[in-house]
Image: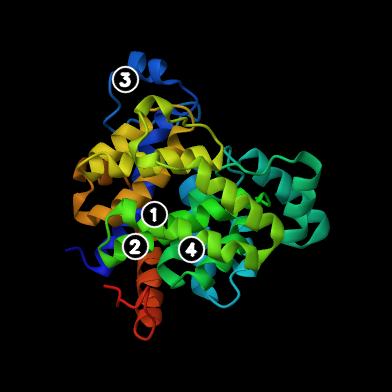
Amino acid sequence: MPTLEDRVRGGLYGLAVGDALGAAAEFLDREEVRRRYGVLRDVVGGGWLGLRPGEWTDDTEMTLAVAEGVARDPADPVPHVGEAFLRWRATDPPDVGGTVRAVFRAYDRLGDWHRAAREVHARTGATAGNGALMRTLPLAFVYPGPAELFSRCVEVARMTHWDPEAGLTCFLYCRAVQGLLEGEELPAAFDRAAAEMEREAPLEDSEVGRAASLLRGKLAGVFSWPEERLRPSGYTVDTLACALWCAANTGSFEEAVVKAVNLGGDADTVGAVTGGLAGVMHGYGAIPRRWLAKFDDGQRARLDAAVGRLVELARAFRRSQYISGKEVL
């Protein structure tokens, strides 16, 4: 059975390779992916961003920002996550999502992440994108759930994505990851997470509580959906459904991520979210070496630093805390 460190490393590296693999198919539909690549199985770069093979996108960058912020102060991560977001923005990345870009502009005026995100949501009514889900994985390793994990997932999601579904999908994802750390099968881990979501959500606020009940219905039976029902869109619920389905209905890390990115659509994010989940499930050793070889020394150093910080925090929290009464690996 993979160790805690192997699962954390598998999660972060899995997310990054899923991002890099999927970037080549972003914004293509399934048939366009088939025509261009047959089956996309290798990290080839290109795509609409013209990436070099192994280069990743905002999915990995924002995940590393969350990991950094949480490590700096687990008790109050938002200011530090925000500082990391702004340092990334200062590099002038070409792939900042529309909601995140709008919140950055609002933050420049308001100086408060949650006020900025709430303003953008009030103006657009459209902040249930997957830009919070794609970066949430580090929280699963730091905050034993469900109560604290729920509040942290919502808090960090709502730095940019105020819609309740954004924070709720982050919780479902992270809590399912925690079930995998216990050795649960993914469907059982997800079912428990969904029940806990409905219990915790009304404690946040009434709007979140109502959204939780609706969300559970939207994802009912997801593991037995026909593949044709999967929609690799930028909507956070669609992305979570794709990741859960691909991770549960394949037998290896590689097949899970290949299945995910070949759905097309928002392929880098679907690949990243699936890769994080499958990396925790199967461990770092299951990630194909040929994919990892595409990362340069600088990329590996950044991932390794994040892994080290998160493993240290995870061990510190788990020396005295339990998930569902069972000690975590």
Q: Earlier in the sequence, mark 2 or mark 4?
A: 2
What's the distance in space between the residues labelled 3 and 4, CA to CA?
A: 41 Å
The residue that mark 4 highlights is: 196
Q: Secondary structure at mark 1?
A: helix
Question: Residue 153: which quarter of the image?
Answer: bottom right
Residue 23, relative to residue 285: is it above or below? Answer: above
What's the distance in space between the residues labelled 3 and 2, CA to CA?
A: 35 Å
Q: Earlier in the sequence, mark 1 or mark 4?
A: 1
Check the image and tell me how it is coloured: rainbow
Q: Which mark is residue 179?
A: 2
What's the distance in space between the residues labelled 2 and 4, CA to CA?
A: 12 Å
| Nearer to me, 45 or 236 | 236
Going by the numbered disc 2, the residue's amino acid type is: Gly
- Marks 1/3 in contact by CB < 8 Å: the verdict is no
Question: Residue 126: which quarter of the image?
Answer: top right
Q: Which mark is residue 190?
A: 1
Would you say 143 lies left or right of 256 here?
A: right
Going by the numbered disc 3, the residue's amino acid type is: Tyr
Residue 230, relative to residue 207: is it above or below? Answer: above
Question: Between tags 3 and 2, which lies in front?
Answer: 2
